[in-house]
Image (cartoon, rainbow, N blue to C red):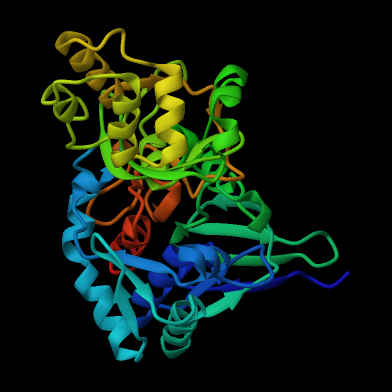
Amino acid sequence: MSAPATHNFDALILGAGAAGLMCAIEAGRRGRRVAVLDHADRPGKKILISGGGRCNFTNLHCRAENFLSQNPHFAKSALARYTPSDFLALVNRHGIAWHEKKLGQLFCNGSARQILDMLLAECAAANVQIFLRTSVRTVSRDTGFHLVAGDQSTRTEFRAPVLVIATGGLSIPKIGATGFGYQIARQFALPIVEPRPALVPLILDPEDQRRWGDLTGLSTEVVASTDDARFQEKMLITHRGLSGPAILQISSYWQPGEPISLDFAPASNLAAPLLAHPQRDIARVRAALREKLPQRLADRLLELDPPAGLNNRALETWDRSLHHWQLFPAGTEGFSKAEVTAGGVDTASLSAKTMESRVPGLFFIGEVVDVTGHLGGFNFQWAWASAAAAGRAV
């Protein structure tokens, strides 16, 4: 039997997604011999499906406050040294047309394919080698890192003094997400913050599904909140529960067994026109509610929680209840529907400046790290920023 093929590089990067490709570009530009390895048959699958196929590639208002982590300060260094303007300059240099949709969210005018093609072109210019359909079986470390890919008949070995883990999280397994990055962290005794689905629809219990399920497809603006966060955006009622931007956002903060609070009429006093009117009846209450909310939702809320009376106190109490409506989700739609994974490699074991772990030469970047962005381009910006930090250090 012939000896397995062995490839030697200055840096190996596991994962050909947003973070992995960006890290390879930065390291390759510095003259490093870089290889990117991925078990998938093509790179950047998550890039291609993001933003409805148009890739929400960054957010102009990116700050550390837009990220969830056990260490809320960890992301500051990387985000400060590679900003949305830096990535936008790269986009502009490649002539990719873009637009701001809302709240600082930047999208391609055309296809997300343009962002992937840009990254691949930059990799080629930096002499980065990309190995697809390369399933790494073992990772070991002696004087450097030794990776073995393939089975006995197709065994290939890779060696380098530096290994960067950019394997992503557990979200959307149908496009190839795995927990391999966490496995490597555990192998080298690095702590993990338990991964969980984030930016994910919430499921209601059977009783609440019966109350709301026939309103499937109805969308309305709400403020969704927990004790730790609040978001004012659209909510969508589904046949199993709740979705839409407001719910996806709050899902990252929601904990099982806890309620979420919904304000159905942000910044509106529903009782005010009723209190000012000398004649009061339930028809007038319904009309006031329909002025602010979709008709079917207004009728359902009135059916589930009518005012206890038509005097001032009862109407004011009823108004408050519509601003603080509590629901207890039964769970989430899980990793299959989650846009990202919260939790991951504990930042306490990583350098905020370089993303290097306490194991010399071993780096973790992107979604595999316990840094999770809000909806709206923030997770891509974390991918670019953490990747640049590592790529400039390897």
Quadrant of res 363: bottom left
Please give the count of numbered marks on the rendered protein.
0
At 24% from the left and 47% from the top, the residue drawn is 66
376 relative to 68, above or below: below
Residue pictured at 23% horizontal, 57% vertical: 78
Picture layout, residue 337 above or below residue 209: below
- In this image, 98 relative to 20: left or right? left
**Residue 197 at what x, y percent from top left?**
50, 38
Q: Tell me: 64 left or right of 23.
A: left
Q: Quadrant of the N terminus?
A: bottom right
Foreground of the two, 83 or 148: 83
Above or below, 225 against 259 in this view is below
- Front residue of 156 and 71: 71
Q: Could you tell me if residue 264 is visible in this image? A: no
Image coords of residue 299 (percent x, y): 44, 29
| Residue 65 visible to the viewer | yes
